[in-house]
Image: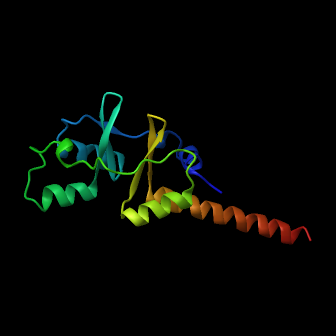
Amino acid sequence: MKNVSDILRHKGSRAASITVSPDTTVLDALKIMAEKNIGSIMIMNGEEYLGIMTERDYSRKVILKGKSSTDTKVSEIMSDDLPRVTPYDTVDFCMELMSDKNIRYLPVFDNAKLLGIVSINDLVKETIRTHEETITHLKDYLHSM
């Protein structure tokens, strides 16, 4: 069964999270997210993980509340209650967790060290990759008969 470490390995250098400090403005964070073509950004105070800001946080906690992106700090709208996963957790476990909690991102920790982030898109890609591998193995088996 595939696990989070497989996803991080496939992501390679993209597994490293893009981070900002808690006093970064929402607008600056959004610019980074647009530049990197990502839907979330990690909020860190030095080496300490504080939370994550997502596009959903922006739309629900800034736009819908009439706040200003230039005056609001990411620390004011970040999600700091996301469940954490480890490299050893399975893809199925992560999908179930995301579905149950209605979330799209999970921070990955090995003990207290932040390793990166996995998205629902990462999980879907890994599931597809697993199915493709199974199909290839079955085809090879059938052709060897």
Residue at x-position 85% and y-position 72%: 142
Color scheme of the displayed model: rainbow
Question: Residue 140's quadrant in the figure?
Answer: bottom right
- Give the quadrant of the C terminus: bottom right
Tell me residue 99's x, y (percent).
Answer: 42, 66
Residue at x-position 64% and y-position 61%: 130
Tell me residue 76's x, y (percent).
Answer: 17, 45
Farthest-out residue, top? 46
Depth check: 9 or 114 in front?
114
Residue at x-position 18% and y-position 45%: 26
- Give the quadrant of the N terminus: bottom right
The number of callouts visible is 0
Tell me residue 20's x, y (percent).
Answer: 28, 36
Farthest-out residue, right? 145
Q: Is residue 120 left or right of residue 64?
A: right
Residue at x-position 62% and y-position 55%: 2
Q: Is residue 87 left or right of residue 83?
A: right
Whether 37 is drawn above or below 111: the answer is: below
Depth check: 123 or 79 in front?
79
Tell me residue 30's x, y (percent).
Answer: 24, 48
Q: Is residue 35 left or right of residue 105?
A: left
